[in-house]
Amino acid sequence: MIISLSLMVSILSVQAQETYENANLATQDLNGTARYVGMGGALDALGADISTISTNPAGIGLFRHSNASLSFGMVSQKDAVEFGGGNKTNMSFDQAGFIYVSRTGRQSFLNFGFNYHKSRNFDFLMFAGGNLNGGSQNRVSYNKAIDENGNDRGFAYVERDNPNDFGTVTSDYIECSQLDYLYWNTVNFNPLITGQDAMYYYEGDNYLMQKYNKGYVGAYDFNLSGNLNDRVFLGLTLGIKDVHYRSYSNYSEYFTRNPENLGGTMVEDDREITGTGFDIKAGVIFRPIEESPFRIGLSIASPTFYELTTNNLTRMWVDDKDANPNTYESNSGLTNQESYEFKFNTPWNFGLSLGHTIDNFLALGASIDYSDYSSIDNRVNTSWDSWSGDYNSESDRDMNDHTSKTLKGVTTVKLGAELKPEPSLAVRLGFNYVSPIYKDTGVKDNMVSSNGVYYSSSMDYTNWKDTYRITAGFGYKVGSVNLDMAYQYSQTDGVFTPFYDCYEPANKPQSVDVSNKRHQLIFTLGYTF
């Protein structure tokens, strides 16, 4: 017999995603030209750098000559344990773009720009392990399947002719996930083991998680900007995002001693997310005092409206120490594979920046951005609109409620300085701080009545804390060519938890500290014409 999900899958073919996955897609890195990174991104009011096209579009209005640039480098994760196809050091193509400048008056310009930059680099390796204290993921699935009296909830059971046959299902178990299906049909419900038509669970001793993420979000920005009498600078940018995300993990649980002599389970999960999004950004920079180069910048960015597709292949392995072909032999390697489309909208972003220069010797920049990630809009595709050639959608209220309880507003502070001991040489320093996106009480609640849970193939989650970035760099200009290099060290610490069981708080595994420490080198080749 199996507990089956086929009706749920057939009805919900295009759905919404989950809080933790969307938060990972919505956040951004500090990346762009070597000058921008070397100054910690604090160029939103100083402008005249192509990377400001995506932070304060008015910064493109400060260009006085046309320019083209290309940036590339490498990213290395400190203290990482390589696993599967993930490497701790990877080459990265970070930026390519140009600015075309046209004069419209004695001190007025109209500029056009295009820039590509890697706004998010997903390359990351994780190794985490701890005690289960008697809990287990199969116990979470077991708790979903029974009521408060320990009785089955009346789920539909069908005879299993094919280990991968989902059979039929009632509407009772709206909170079931792909992972529940795998546990139910390997360890939770197996008459060959229990000898009876009933649910069952195994207590865990310890766990081990090995994971790597790879891929990127590419941002393509088109800009129109200019200035009025060298006092007011205006800019507008249309951005297109291109998502390429891959996550592969092995999660193992080792059971306490049991009559069936089962050693444990291992979940192999391979997920890919691809798709596109778009946003609109606007900005202004102005000099309040005509005789002073001091300037103030304001910017606003709309949500990024994402349309994405996720595909996963998830397999459950059971360690039968007795190697008895009459028990779990038929269940070893039980596989589940699904694909669906979903939408979500990132939050609005607001920025305030200051900039000041002293002759051609020193430039100072500071900026602060704010985004309320608790307002991420997870959306459910409802019906196909033949007129627009797209799905209609509506907000997923239950998942949005979970998001508001899990995420919070994020403040980004950027500070930078550029010193030119001589006109052709520049030395740069920067600091970048991002406050935590997750609340300390945040959990990955797999009982939310949402399509994002229905198609979930993992229970683990990490509450990442604040991010610190320290940057430095230099630039050298020879005629019309500039060569720049920057170094960035970033660190984000977090707390990893393998699962959360809202039905049985005592089923609590050990949470462990994890960290993402990265070294990055960026080189930029630029040409002014």
Image: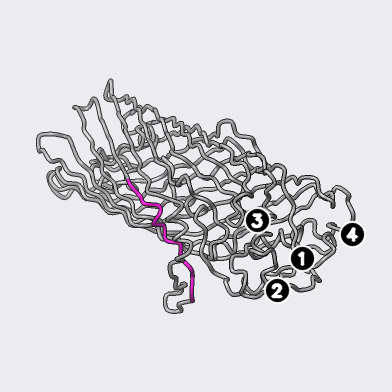
Tag 2: amino acid: Ala
Q: CA distance from mark 4 to mark 2?
A: 25 Å
Tag 3: amino acid: Val
Mark 3: few, some, or many residues within 10 Å (few <14, many ≥20)?
many
Disc 1 versus disc 4: nearer the observer: 1
Residue 10 position in % (x across, y down): 62, 74
Q: Which residue corresponds to mark 3? A: 140
Residue occupying the point 15% across, 40% down: 287
Residue 388 position in % (x across, y down): 42, 75
Tag 1: amino acid: Ala
Q: Which residue corresponds to mark 2? A: 156
Instruction: Please say if 415 is above or below 437.
Output: above
Q: Nearer the viewer, residue 168 or 476?
A: 168
Residue 294 showing in the rendered view: yes
Q: Secondary structure at mark 4?
A: loop
Give the number of the disc on residue 395. none
Q: Which residue corresponds to mark 4? A: 326
Q: CA distance from mark 3 to mark 2?
A: 19 Å
Q: Secondary structure at mark 3?
A: helix
Residue range corresponding to the magenta coloring: 370-383
Residue occupying the point 70% across, 74% down: 156
Q: Secondary structure at mark 1?
A: loop
